[in-house]
Amino acid sequence: MDCFAAAVDSAKVALEKGCIGTPVAVQIMVNTAEGGEDLDPLLGRGLEASAFWLGDEPQRLAALGGAENGQISVLAKFPKGQTALVCAGAEKILATPARNMAGSAWRQVSQ
C-alpha cells in the first residue's frame, strides 16, 4: 500500500467536500527513500500534491541538502503567498552529522 498516495487522496477528498478550509501552508515529510537517487521522485510527488492543494504552481523554490546526504528539503512559495515545505529523506542516514551540517545554506533554484 502506498501510504503517501492514501494521504494525498484523503486530503484531496476533504478539500473537494469542503471539510477543511482554504489551505495556506503545506508541510510534507517523506523519509522512505532507499537511497539518494530516490529523493527526486518523492520531492516531485510532494510538490505536485502541494500545488494541487494550494491551487497554483509555485513561483519560487529554494532547496537545502543533497542526494549525497540522504535528505533534500524544498521550500516553495506560491503566487498568493502560500508556502509549502517538502522534505524527502532516506530511511537510513547516508552521511555523518558533521557532513550534514556542512554547507547547510538554502540555495535558490528558481525565481
Image (tube, rainbow, N blue to C red):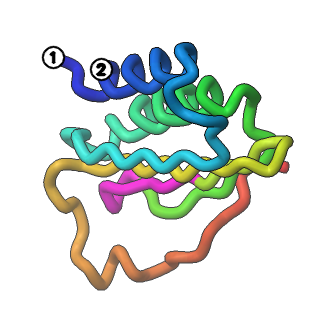
Give the number of the disc on residue 39: none
Left or right: where does residue 63 sit relative to residue 97?
A: right
> Percent position (x, y) of residue 109?
71, 52
Residue drawn at the location 48% of the way across and 34% of the way down: 46
Amino acid residing under circle 2:
Ala
> Percent position (x, y) of residue 100?
35, 74
Left or right: where does residue 73 sit relative to residue 107?
A: left
Amino acid residing under circle 1:
Met
The answer to whether one can see residue 110 in this image is: no
Secondary element type, mark 1: loop
Q: Tell me the quadrant of the picture where the N terminus can be found.
A: top left
Left or right: where does residue 43 sit relative to residue 98?
A: right
Is 72 in front, or is 82?
A: 82
Q: Marks 2 and 1, how far apart in space?
A: 8 Å
> Quadrant of the rendered structure where residue 63 is?
bottom right
Residue drawn at the location 33% of the way across and 61% of the way down: 69
Total labels: the figure holds 2
Most extreme residue toward the front is: 19
> Percent position (x, y) of residue 64?
53, 63
> Label 1: which residue?
1
Disc 2 to disc 1: CB gap under 8 Å: yes
Q: Tell me the crowding category of disc 1: few under 14, some 14 to 19, or many 20 or more residues within 10 angstroms, Cα based.
A: few
> Percent position (x, y) of residue 40?
45, 36
Is 75 in front, or is 19?
A: 19
Q: Would you say residue 63 sits in the magenta stretch?
A: no
Residue drawn at the location 25% of the way across and 40% of the way down: 33
Residue drawn at the location 85% of the way across and 49% of the way down: 111
Q: Which residues are magenta?
A: 67-74
> Label 2: which residue?
6
> Quadrant of the rendered structure where residue 75 is?
bottom right
Is 100 in front, or is 91?
A: 91
Query: Which numbered disc flags the more N-terminal residue, 2 or 1?
Result: 1
